[in-house]
Image (cartoon, helix red, strand yellow):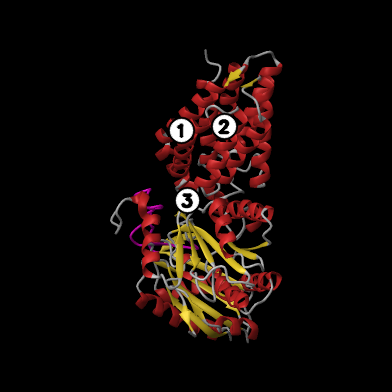
Amino acid sequence: MKKLINKPEDVVREELEGIALAHPDLVKVHYEPDYIVRADAPVKGKVGLVSGGGSGHEPLHGGFVGMGMLDAACPGAVFTSPTPDQMLEATKAVDGGAGVLHIVKNYTGDVMNFEMAAEMAQMEGIEVASVVTNDDVAVQDSLYTAGRRGVGITVFVEKIAGAAAEEGRSLAEVTAVAKKVNDWGRSMGMALTSCVVPQAGKPTFDLGEDEMEIGIGIHGEPGRKRMKIAPVDEIVEMLAEPIISDLPYKEGDKVIAMVNGMGGTPLIELYIAYRKLHHVLEGHGITIVRNLVGNYITSLEMAGMSITLMKADDELIKLWDAPVKTAGLRWGV
Amino acid sequence: MITKEEILAWLHRYREVLAENKEYLTELDAAIGDADHGINMDRGFGAVEKKLDGVAEKDIGTILKTVGMTLVSTVGGAGGPLYGTFFLKAGMTLSGKNELSAEDMVAALNAAIEGVKMRGKATTGEKTMLDALVPALEAMQKTIADGGDIHAALEAATAAAEEGMKATIPMLATKGRASYLGERSIGHQDPGATSSWLMLKTAAETIGAS
């Protein structure tokens, strides 16, 4: 294992220390329990947004704490859900009197821990609502599984619900727009290489030199199929077509599109993929009205990418364009 | 009767067993999950170990509730809420008790299992820890009904848990992260069922053995 770390067990703690030192204008970091909170929290009268999940997906979620996006993020150990005590303390820290929305990716551990935290917060008199993201079309038999995984759309939910909360909308309204984003979003990813969890010290899965995994999850969970590597244009089609046919996205639709790197993919390759995605969507009569190209929801040093599409109406585009000031996403300020 | 000292000995020993099996459990999890079960359980019971001395003078219910709360706040993943709920529910059942009868033991395991079912929205046959725990409870009840003592009941429970754990190998996972593998989850032993079997095996080695 070659990594820029000191000791595997100190990875998350030292990352948090770095974030605190790098972004004191945006966030404060609380330790034991660990959470990253907006520097000006709680914002009085505003719905608070709390997310969280295993570490290793940076900039998700801590990099999205700040004006116009999350109020707090709870980092777990690498690829491990955070715990209810973190979520409860973060919820209390961001409660400005208008209630708190938990944004949860659909993984068994995350869902159970956030459920316990929501029960505890409600016992303390804080109104809590939850939205669970589940946009990964790679999971086909969702009736016989824990359901579709929450992946790229989580970035969109955090941005758009964050803007809605900043506008002063109620908890019910912010929750409704968060659910709309998730309902209108679909994603799929692929991997060229595995990742190495620092405390495990070896690759999570084995992939041959000339192989790729289509439909990979953000923790290296297997996807739809393993196959010989292909040119990127073909890979983009393999990801985009199942996404398009799933919602389905139709001729005349406007979408916000993300081509996301898994952590170990150079931007040059992501732009080649974006170029092809643009053409594939054009072929379906679908227009990309906004986009993100870069590393937003990663899987440590995994090489690969994911594509996320969200159908966009005027309301969602307006909220997307609203100012945001976080370490990982910043515009309009 | 089960003494408080035996309960503490069981918890201390389970912590050692988890440390010894950290890599094994993590490898089982790497095959069908996210390669963290051994690491998480080791971290959780490491934290439990630090709390045990502080509650050693309290009743068994309080000790087990402390274990549960510690696991909930240190393990994360699915294991934290599930094992946390397991010990919380057992602890609530045994509130105020300083020694346990066979009936207390059965009642605590039953409440703990019901808690796991509720929290995980799961039942047997889905390739989870319940596939070890539920047969263990049944074997425990049967042994006691047949006149066996606490130690015999724990040994029977361990044997049933081991069988249940092995029975997860050909199962198709429909809960938790392993479910994403679909057919590919078949042929692998469930890590949660394995840590549950180890927990009962350790109980049989430390409780009522004299």
Check disc 1 and report the residue beneath it: B15
* Secondary structure, magenta segment, majority class: loop
Check disc 3 and report the residue beneath it: B34
Span shown in magenta: A192-216
Could you tell which of marks 1 and 3 lies nearer the N-terminus? 1
Q: Nearer the viewer, mark 2 or mark 3?
A: 2
Give residue A185's position: percent from left, percent from top.
60, 72
Q: Alpha carbon of mark 1 to alpha carbon of mark 3: how far?
A: 22 Å
Q: Residue at x 64, y 83 (%)?
A: A315
Q: Chain of mark 3?
A: B
Q: Chain of mark 1?
A: B
Residue B128 visible from this viewpoint: no
Q: Alpha carbon of mark 1 to alpha carbon of mark 2: how far?
A: 15 Å
Q: Are marks 1 and 3 in contact (CB under 8 Å)?
A: no
Compared with residue A158, is residue A302 higher up or lower down, i.e. above or below?
above
Q: Residue at x 47, y 52 (%)?
A: A32
- Disc 2 marks a residue whose amino acid type is Ile
Q: Residue at x 54, y 40 (%)?
A: B192
